[in-house]
Structure formats: structure tokens, C-alpha cells
Image (cartoon, rainbow, N blue to C red):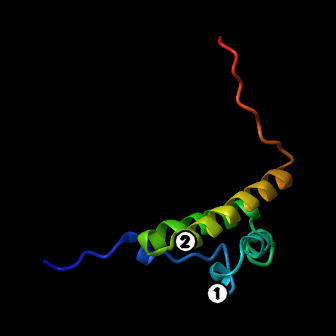
Amino acid sequence: MAHKRKWSARVKTDSTHPPAGLFNKDAATIARTLASKRVSPKGPGSGMRMLTFFINRAGRNLSAKRRATLNRAKSLLSERARRANGTRKRAHSSRVA
């Protein structure tokens, strides 16, 4: 039986343009770069989708340390996206209706 290729291998994007080797850098650099208009013309949300796609695509090939760094970059990028949208993180309500 022939090896079936994953759909993600065919994905081509024109919305984000990350520089080569970006995902091998530290979390702050990744977040800052993906939030820039030069890399993500549609804003930090576009960069967040690219980062999530990269993490999902790498799958089990990511070391625990690298995955932690990328997840930290996601947190930083999420903060930037919230600031760009002018929203704040909501606290969970513990009241009962």
C-alpha cells in the first residue's frame, strides 16, 4: 500500500512570510517577528495561526524543550494580539446562575 501524504504537506500560504530559521530562535524573537506587519500583514492573529500550524505540523519531532519555547512564543503572541485588539483577558466567573 502506498504511503498516503498528509494534507498539510500541500498547504501553501501567501498571508505570512516568516524568515528562514525563525522557529529555531527564542520565544520573544518569534513572537515579535510574527506580530510584525512585514511578516504578518493581517496582524498578530495571522502569525498565531502560522505558529500553531508549525507546532502541529512538527508533531512528535519537536523536543519537549523546543515545544515549550514555541508555546511560550504563542503566549507572548497572544498577549500582543489582545493588546492590538484592545481587549483584556477575562477572568473566569465562579458565580452560579
Does residue 62 appear to the left or right of 2 in the view shown?
right
In the rendered image, which quarter contains the C terminus? top right
Quadrant of res 19: bottom right
Most extreme residue toward the left, as rendered? 1
Residue 46 showing in the rendered view: no
Residue at image mark 1: 21
Quadrant that contains the N terminus:
bottom left
**Within 10 angstroms of label 2, few (less than 14), some, or many (20 or more) residues?**
few
Residue at coordinates 63% horizontally, 82% vertically from top-left? 24
Q: Earlier in the sequence, mark 1 or mark 2?
A: 1
Quick check: 21 left or right of 88? left
User: Is 77 on the left-hand or right-hand side of 49?
Assistant: right
Q: Farthest bottom residue?
A: 20
Choose top left, top right, bottom left or bottom right for residue 30: bottom right
Callout 1, which amino acid? Gly
* Rendered position, 31 above or below 10: above
Query: In the rendered image, which residue does mark 2 sit on?
Result: 54
Task: Report, in whole angstroms, how far the alpha carbon at label 1 lies from the one at label 2.
Answer: 12 Å
Q: Position of residue 23 (x, y in %)?
A: 63, 78
Element at badge 1? loop
Residue 7 is labelled as none
Q: From the viewer's perspective, is 15 left or right of 54?
A: right
The quarter of the displayed image where residue 36 is located: bottom right
Specify the amino acid type for callout 2.
Phe
Image spot of residue 91 (x, y percent): 75, 33
As helix, strand or loop, the secondary structure at mark 2 comes to: helix
Residue in the image at 57% along x and 75% along y: 13
Q: Which of these two is toward me, 8 or 57?
A: 57
Q: Position of residue 27 (x, y in %)?
A: 72, 71
How far from the left and from the top, in percent, is residue 68? 61, 65
Q: Is residue 77 visible?
A: yes
